[in-house]
Amino acid sequence: MSKSTSLYNKYLLFIAGLGGLLYGIDVGVIAGALPYLQATTDYTPGQLSTVVAAVLLGSVLSSLFAGALSDLFGRKKVMLLAGVCFVLSVPVICSPFGFEALVLGRILQGAAAGLIGVVVPLYLAECLTADKRGFGTGMFQFMLTVGLVFAALAGILCAGYVDGVVAADYASVTEKAAAIFEAKDFAWRAIFWICAIPGVIFTVGAIFISESARWLYGRGKTEAALKALERSRGPEQAKLELAEMGADKPEEASASKEADKPKDSLFQKKYIIPFVLAVVILACNQATGINSVLAYIVDVLAQAGLEGSLANKGDLVVKILNMLMTIVAMILVDRKGRKFLLTLGTSGIIVGLLGVAFLFLNSERKMVDYTSLINKNAYDYVRVEKVVNEKTGLEELNADGTVKTQDVKYAFFAAVTPEEIKGLTKAETFVPSQVKLVYTINDEVSVKTLVVREDTPSSELEVKIPAKEDQSFAIKSLEIGPLPSAMNGWLVTLFFAIFIASFAVGPGVCVWLALSELMPNRIRAMGMSIALLINQGVSTVIAGTFLPVVGNFGYSTIFFFCAGCTVIYWITAVFFLPETKGRTLEEIEAIFEGKKK
């Protein structure tokens, strides 16, 4: 391989890696910006949830069309489109046009993520040599984890700026309040602007990469395909690979316009097995609960027995471990193979999830039901503490705790205090406890799980809900149990570490390879779109049901469920997945067609 060819392949990996970085930023950027967005706008919780979820909507919509677009216009042009969507999203999000513009910008970010998630692994699979394809796709996953950290660092940088403003001295309280407001308003916008930088680099860089040779060949552009191959392979290897394309699918060598119209259906017999395998792998990949674990791990570790500050440190450790083990996977994937890493990874995930589930089950069995000892319609142990009139700023309550006026922004319901826990449990001294409170607001059931220590701030023992004049409130159940020990929390952290390390070294990297390698050439783009859409659908369902399931049935239930789904993943990897290491895409396709090469 010549020096120029080697440099081009490195450049190609760099641009594709930036695609993974953008995907990770899309997922993680809102976490740092949301607190400042809440502090500087009057958006309702429902509107803020819409802002968070808009990325998923954009991603789902673009995933539907990503395959068709990449087949119609080419892989390179769709990558450029993704970069443009990402870059344009930032000025739209940061514009002064309010909620609608913010949601539109987030949808654009999601559209970029959906396009990148399909077309970049597809492009890598078609452009890299068989011995580098695993490393290249691993680079995409590694840069995705870097994107999560990049977004977090942008948030930390802006948080430091806000903290500096808060600590500064001002002539008056009013002046300081105005300065803090401006700092927070600047901070959430700055986070998005910082994250736009890699988007600009990706978009400009994608201009200088070659189109996929396989896409060009499939469109009858044989000379262009040869030139693209020569840029990454060298002249001799390029001719050999082009000949292999023609030998494997001679009918595709036609340069007629009919070549632009794929005739094969996704559901022909020779395509069903690889398509189903890809779908099962992608669905099970999300059914491990990876996204929900990464999103809620701080809360989970706090419930497991760790102090809040330690739980946050545990979150950072997990993200760093995720990055390091992804590097290990990149090194091993082309040496040990996809099947080996998926088998190893899913085995570790099962161990990690079962360990977490059994530890939580042991804690949950110690919970005692105190519902029968309280008056559910009075505010003996869960009381309305205050309701503030939005217009006057004054507390306005009737004697029975009902709201006097409709001009109310929020009601704050104070949860069980340490003194009340001591009274309920009839303990001589207060024992740090976990409290599970199920209550209804206008017959809508909600669940709140609290960690209560003697030094727990009252702000952490509140349930914040919108208040209206005709609002009704009642307690359905109240369970109290001892708070798990710090040792229990560290054991949960250990099993989470096993889970994250196993995911990173196996499914984290191999899922993108399965998505791109298993699909036959003619249906690869459309099949990947459908499979990725199913992947995102499973992720959405788990994320949407995670907290309700935890509230009603406990953490053990959700983690046992995820472990069960991972068993299906393991069976698929061990007994049904062929090894694709070192094989060209045409050789992999021949396996499912029953041919021997």
Image (cartoon, rainbow, N blue to C red):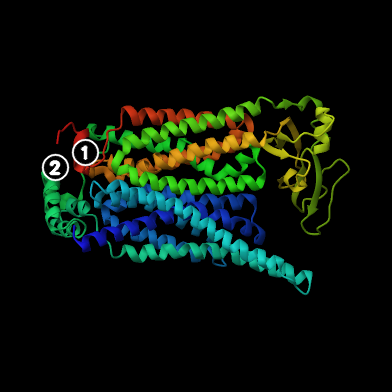
Against 102, residue 462 (above or below) is: above
Q: Position of residue 380 (x, y in %)?
A: 84, 35
Residue type pointed to by label 2: Asp
Residue 589: which disc?
A: 1
Q: In which quadrant is the C terminus drawn? A: top left
Q: Residue at x 58, y 45 (%)?
A: 314
Camera-nearest residue between 117 and 137: 137
Task: Tell whether 444 sits left or right of 431.
Answer: left
Q: Residue at x 76, y 27 (%)?
A: 371
Q: Nearer the viewer, residue 269 or 142?
A: 142
Q: Are marks 1 and 2 in contact (CB under 8 Å)?
A: yes
Image point (78%, 24%), residue name:
372
Res. 462 in view = no
Mark 1, residues whose alpha carbon is within 10 Å: few (<14), some, or many (≥20)?
many
User: Badge 2, how many Cα within 10 Å: few under 14, some, many 20+?
Assistant: some
Give residue 527's quadrant in the image: top left
Badge 1 marks a residue whose secondary structure is: helix
The reply, left or right, for residue 4 in relation to residue 572 is: left
Q: Which residue is mark 2?
A: 248
Out of 482 and 470, give the one closest to the viewer. Answer: 482
